[in-house]
Structures are given as C-alpha cells and as structure tokens.
C-alpha cells in the first residue's frame, strides 16, 4: 500500500529529474524523447504515478491528485518552454545563414558586344557609304570564272598559286572565293545602270594559309569605281580619304607601283606606321621602314572589262570609253593596325579577355 507521502516524494524526485535532464537536452529530437519518457500515454513516468492514485486511502486521493496534476502541468509547461527555445534557435541560425549581404557585388548578366572585326567592317562601310558607294554582297562559294578567269588570271596564271583555296566536290566545279574581287565581276554583271559602278564588297574569304598573320578564313573588302573619265587621281584621293577617316589625318599616305593581274597600273598604298608614328628608323611593326602596307589597288585592267563584256554578250564596258579603279584590303589587317593586335588568331579564339576590350 503506497502512502501519500511516498507518492509526494516520488513526484518531487520526478520534478527534480526533469529539471536536471532538461538542462542537458541538446536539441529538439532529444526533447521529444524526454517528453515520451515523462509524459508518454503508455509508459511515461508521470503518467504511471496517476495509476498509483487508486492504491491510496480514499481521504488522501484528493491531495495526491492535486499534487500529480501540478507535476503534470509543470512538466508540460517546462517541456513546451524548452521546445520554443529550440525552435527560436533554429530559426535564428537559418536566418543568419540565409542573410543577404548587401555589400557583395551584384551578379550582373554580362551583355555581349560587337566583335572587333564587326566594328571595323561597320566603320569601313560607313566611310565608303559617305563617299557615295553602295554595299554589294556576293556569294562565298563561287566559281573559277568569277574568282580567277574574269580577273585576268587564266588557268595557268602564276598568281593563282598564291591564292590556293578550297575546292568543292561535284559539278559544276566550285570553290571558296580567295578574295572579294569576285565582287568586281559580279557587280558589273548585275549593274542596272551601266557603265557607272561604285560599290564596296565586304565579306569572308578563304585560302590555304595558317600562321601568325594568315588564317584560312579571313575578311576582305573590295572597292570598285567604274565610269567615264575615272583616273588614277580619283583612286589616290579616295583611298587617302579612307585612310585618314579610319586612322586619322596625321598619317602620311604613299603610293608605290605594284603588280596585280586585274589592274594596270597597280599601286600599293602605305600609311605612316601607327606604332612608331612613321619614325625614319622605323620599328618592329613596320619592319624598320616607317610605313605600313594598307591596300592593294590599281586601274581596272582592260582585260577585265572584256571578260565581263563577253559574259554579257555585248560591249557594255568599252575599255576605250570607260575606266575604273579597284582596291582591296583585309578587315583583319585594318583591325590589327588600328588596335595594335599582333596575332591574327586572337580574332577567332572567342577569348572573352580579348573581346571585352572592344566592348
Ligand atoms: Zn613603325
């Protein structure tokens, strides 16, 4: 037979044990185990004490019941308190780990920018449009007639060796154009108001070259002016205006005799070296000459007019009446000189560190 005193003593012990264990409970999982141990419906120690009530003398039951209820309420309150403490701690640690540090730099999405060759192409086009030229676009896959034959380079012409290219399988024979000079022939053939022509043909070209200054794919621009009374003076004035517009008026321009199969006379156009500012002793960039080669040009060869006339089946460009000048250069060459780039391969490697310098 249990006594009231035993039960009250047992209740006090339980209360002290609960306090002690609560103090050393590390987390909410252990707290849940503690709750089961004390207040579990089936085997909780506080719950078990209630079962002893029936064993007491009837006059003691009221007092014992009040004591047990007090113990139960106390236990529930202390456990809930501990639970709230753990929840609060968990929330705080989550908040501190997810806190936004406003001092960090933002994650901006980088926007693309124009490739240096695109910038140069647009600039070259703008200059010639300003001089009254139209932009003429031709195919990259062309044939022998437009690429060589009509440009006064028949099948056995040695100049073809310098323009070894890629040939496509199938008939009729086709090739990747080696220069934008194909635009000269195509623009004259397509001309709706002959004999006047004033076109700039920019575009991709191809050759079997691959080194620090040559790429199997590169970009050229070709210009052609044809009309009655066009002279070498027009050529010189136009190309000097172009160089001054792109590089600046401070650079001297000079013309040297040269040779191209499709122009006669032919002239090479140089400008003062932009690296050493045309110093007499020169520098590495200009190979100690003080000059940089910028364009090839010349007066359209009568044989070129005759090839076009033959294809048209009538004399539209009579060499006795019309004349013209043509010129060409590489976009890469212009860009390398203008931006001081020494390796042509940088244009094609898609290296952001290189490209973002032009954005
Ligand atoms: Zn130089």
Image (spheres, helix red, strand yellow):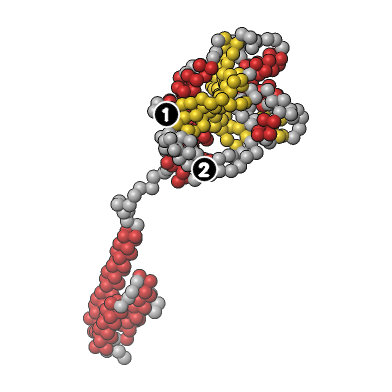
Q: Residue 110, relative to residue 22: is it above or below?
A: above
Residue 320, located in which quarter of the rendered image?
top right
Where residue 331 appears, as percent x and y from the top left, is 52, 32
Where residue 4 appears, as percent x and y from the top left, is 25, 87
Residue found at x 29% / y 64%: 88
Residue 67, located in which quarter of the rendered image?
bottom left
Whether residue 315 can be seen here? yes
Left or right of 42 in this view: 311: right
Q: Residue 201, relative to residue 11: is it above or below?
A: above
- Of all residues, the one furthest to the bottom in this rendering is 1
Q: Quadrant of the C terminus?
A: top left
Q: Earlier in the sequence, mark 2 or mark 1?
A: 1
Residue found at x 34% / y 78%: 38
Residue position for label 1? 251
Residue 106 vs residue 73, the one in the foreground: 106
Q: Quadrant of the N terminus?
A: bottom left
Residue found at x 49% / y 16%: 132
Residue at disc 1, CB closer than 8 Å to ligand 1: no
Marks 2 and 1, how far apart at CA: 23 Å
- Of all residues, the one furthest to the right in this rendering is 171
- Of all residues, the one furthest to the front in this rendering is 281
Would you say the residues marked 2 and 1 are in contact, meaning their CB atoms lie under 8 Å apart?
no
Where residue 353 appears, as percent x and y from the top left, is 45, 46
Where residue 215 appears, as percent x and y from the top left, is 59, 39
Whether residue 202 can be seen here? no
Label 1, residues with CA under 10 Å away: few <14, some 14-19, many ≥20: some
Left or right of 22 in this view: 271: right
């Amino acid at each position: 037979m249990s006594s009231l005193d035993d039960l009250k003593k047992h209740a006090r012990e339980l209360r002290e044990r609960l306090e002690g264990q609560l103090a050393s409970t590390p987390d909410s999982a252990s707290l849940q185990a503690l709750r089961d141990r004390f207040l579990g419906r089936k085997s909780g120690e506080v719950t078990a004490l209630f079962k002893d009530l029936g064993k007491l003398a009837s006059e003691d039951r009221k007092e014992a019941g009040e004591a047990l209820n007090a113990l139960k309420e106390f236990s529930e309150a202390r456990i809930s308190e501990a639970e709230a403490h753990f929840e609060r701690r968990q929330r705080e640690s989550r908040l501190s780990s997810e806190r936004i540090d406003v001092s960090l730099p933002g994650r901006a999405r980088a926007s693309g920018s124009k490739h240096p060759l695109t910038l140069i192409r647009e600039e070259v086009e703008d200059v010639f449009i300003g001089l009254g030229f139209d932009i003429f676009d031709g195919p990259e896959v062309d044939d022998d007639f437009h690429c060589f034959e009509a440009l006064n380079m028949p099948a056995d012409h040695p100049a073809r060796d310098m323009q070894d290219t890629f040939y496509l399988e199938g008939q009729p024979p086709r090739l990747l154009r080696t220069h934008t000079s194909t635009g000269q022939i195509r623009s004259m053939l397509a001309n709706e108001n002959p004999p006047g022509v004033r076109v700039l043909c920019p575009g991709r070209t191809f050759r079997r070259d691959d080194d620090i200054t040559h790429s199997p794919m590169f970009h050229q621009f070709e210009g052609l002016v044809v009309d009655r009374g066009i002279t070498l003076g027009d050529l010189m004035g136009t190309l000097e205006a172009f160089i001054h517009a792109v590089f600046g008026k401070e650079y001297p321009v000079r013309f040297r005799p040269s040779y191209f199969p499709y122009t006669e006379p032919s002239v090479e156009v140089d400008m003062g070296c932009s690296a050493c500012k045309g110093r007499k002793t020169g520098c590495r960039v200009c190979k100690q000459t003080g000059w940089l080669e910028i364009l090839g040009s010349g007066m359209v060869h009568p044989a070129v007019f005759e090839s076009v006339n033959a294809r048209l089946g009538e004399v539209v460009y009579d060499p006795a009446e019309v004349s013209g000048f043509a010129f060409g250069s590489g976009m890469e060459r212009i860009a390398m000189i203008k931006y001081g780039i020494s390796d042509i391969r940088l244009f094609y490697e898609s290296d952001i560190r290189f490209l973002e310098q032009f954005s």
